[in-house]
Image (tube, rainbow, N blue to C red):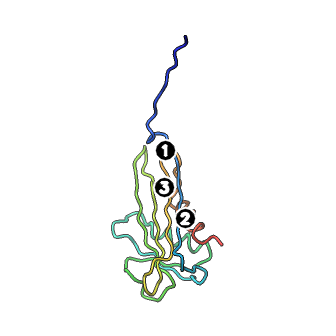
Amino acid sequence: MKKMLIMLIPAAILLSSCASISTTKAPSASLTNLNTFYVQKLPADERGIERVISDQLNLLGYKSTYGKLATPSNPVDAIVTYRDKWMWDLTMYMLQLNLEIRDGKDMRLLASGKSRRPSLARKSPEEMAKEILVRIFKK
């Protein structure tokens, strides 16, 4: 009778290389009228992710600015907030980026998105911001 070697691999190891991207829109939210954005800088961010997100919005054809203030000096259609999480694996890389798009007048949540990219599936912050925004604004 032949002996079989069965290897048990923890689920965490199997899932560690899986990338995930998810987005949601508020049921009553209409994103078609959003043209101007303000990306609010996360106080602890020293990597300029607010600029990265704003640049990606501009590349998608929207008008976007960024800054440290909770609200911009000029009215905008939407305010974008974010949280970034970084990890070390030979180099620092962005593990996760969460975005929230809120109404510029009443701060009502319109849409949100998350990109999670472990080390083996890592992408640049620019690519992660773009993949979230493209999915949120997909027609």
Amino acid type assigned to the residue bearing label 2 in the image: Ile
Residue 115, x across and y down, in percent: 50, 59
C-alpha span from label 1 to label 2? 21 Å
Residue of label 3: 116
Residue 107, x across and y down, in percent: 43, 82
Mark 1 or 2, closer to the camera? 1
Task: Tell me if residue 4 comes above or below residue 56 in the rendering.
Answer: above
Q: Describe the element under mark 2 as helix, strand or loop.
A: helix
C-alpha span from label 2 to label 3? 10 Å
Other-residue count near label 3 (Cα within 10 Å), few / some / many at <14 / 14–19 / ≥20: many
Name the side, left or right, on which 57 lies relative to 94: right
Q: Describe the element under mark 3 as helix, strand or loop.
A: strand
Amino acid type assigned to the residue bearing label 3 in the image: Arg
Q: Which residue lies furthest to the front in this view?
A: 1
Of residues 118 and 1, the one nearer the viewer is 1
Residue 71, x across and y down, in percent: 40, 83
Residue of label 1: 15
Mark 1 or 3, closer to the camera? 1
Q: Where is residue 32, by image quadrant?
A: bottom right
Dot placed on the residue nearer the N-terminal end, 1 or 2: 1
Residue of label 2: 132
Q: Where is residue 10, by image quadrant?
A: top left
